Image (cartoon, rainbow, N blue to C red):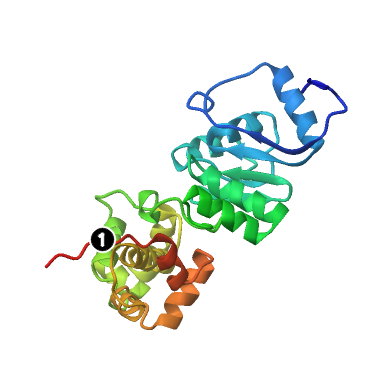
């Protein structure tokens, strides 16, 4: 028998999550809904959202001055709605204090495993992951998608030509001077234009390109880690490992163990 209701002002929550849905990006609710949500979250040990549920929290003012994420396809819209928030568009899930937000669909599973690990420990979370037949567990900082999806300049720009050069020559040295020559620009002008058009420095783009290429090889081939490091321009396995740990929070070996696809060998 029910002994309370969600409108009970004395009700507290261990965890309160707003689920996502295809209409929530533009859906407006009555102010009373947002008022209840603000009050309920203030009484929750942890609160947050899955996928587009972040828009409900945003309209309630619960994402102001916080780091958050959502489905990558909605990230720009969430940034526009929540100008005071730092939307980390390429993250699987983000924890900012008691606030937990995840990207779309299966990222909610990753967040759930993270919460379970916090409450019950790594062993329980691992057993649940095995039961669900999912990876235990993708790091929250791991990218949702290739950085190239949101990091390309206009295709007719000299900057885009330099980016294409990077992707075709990852195994070579790719200094800012080299890339400025490809773009037929001075180093200073190139660096300034690159940051403006792409949103990161040339060196950061080169590093992301190398990491993304290495991820693809680790997922889809059986090439030794040393060979992957060389092919992607890291030079040695230590440099690649350091880059993976900084960007993804896992080593190349761990990444391969989690995401390697079985390669069918034919005679």
Q: Residue furthest top?
A: 30
**65 relative to 32, above or below:** below
The reply to whether residue 228 is visible in this rendering is yes
Label 1 residue SS: helix
The reply to whether residue 91 is visible in this rendering is no
For disc 1, the neighbor class at 10 Å (few under 14, some 14 to 19, many from 20) is some
**80 relative to 3, above or below:** below
Quick one: 259 or 124, which is closer to the camera?
124
Quick one: 255 or 126, which is closer to the camera?
126
**98 relative to 35, above or below:** below
Q: Position of residue 26 (x, y in %)?
A: 52, 24
**260 relative to 176, above or below:** above
Which residue carries the number 1 mark? 164
Quick one: 116 or 138, which is closer to the camera?
116
Number of numbered discs on residues: 1
Residue for point 71% across, 24% down: 34
Quick check: 259 left or right of 15? left
The C terminus is located in which quarter? bottom left
Residue for point 53% across, 58% down: 136
Quick check: 149 left or right of 71? left
Q: Position of residue 51 (x, y in %)?
A: 53, 37
Residue for point 34% across, 62% down: 219
Q: Quadrant of residue 39?
A: top right
Residue for point 15% across, 65% down: 266
């Amino acid at each position: 028998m029910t002994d309370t209701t969600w409108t009970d002002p004395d009700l507290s929550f261990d965890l309160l999550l707003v689920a996502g849905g295809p209409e929530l990006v533009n859906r407006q609710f009555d102010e009373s809904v947002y008022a209840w949500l603000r009050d309920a979250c203030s009484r929750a040990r942890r609160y947050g959202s899955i996928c587009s549920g972040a828009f409900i929290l945003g309209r309630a003012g619960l994402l102001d001055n916080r780091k958050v994420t959502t489905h990558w396809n909605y990230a720009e819209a969430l940034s526009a709605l929540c100008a005071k928030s730092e939307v980390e568009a390429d993250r699987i899930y983000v924890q900012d204090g008691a606030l937990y937000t995840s990207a779309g669909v299966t990222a909610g599973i990753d967040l759930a495993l993270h919460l379970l690990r916090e409450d019950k420990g790594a062993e329980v979370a691992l057993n649940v992951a095995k039961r669900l037949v999912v990876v235990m567990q993708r790091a929250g900082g791991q990218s949702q998608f290739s950085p190239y999806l949101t990091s390309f300049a206009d295709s007719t720009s000299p900057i885009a030509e330099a980016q294409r050069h990077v992707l075709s020559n990852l195994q070579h040295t790719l200094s800012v001077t080299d890339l400025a020559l490809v773009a037929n620009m001075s180093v200073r002008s190139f660096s300034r234009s690159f940051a403006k058009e792409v949103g990161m420095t040339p060196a950061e783009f080169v590093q992301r390109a190398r990491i993304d290429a290495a991820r693809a090889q680790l997922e889809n081939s059986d090439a030794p880690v040393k060979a992957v490091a060389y092919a992607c321009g890291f030079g040695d396995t230590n440099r690649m490992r350091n880059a993976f740990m900084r960007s993804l929070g896992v080593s190349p070996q761990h990444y391969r163990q989690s995401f390697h696809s079985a390669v069918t060998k034919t005679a």
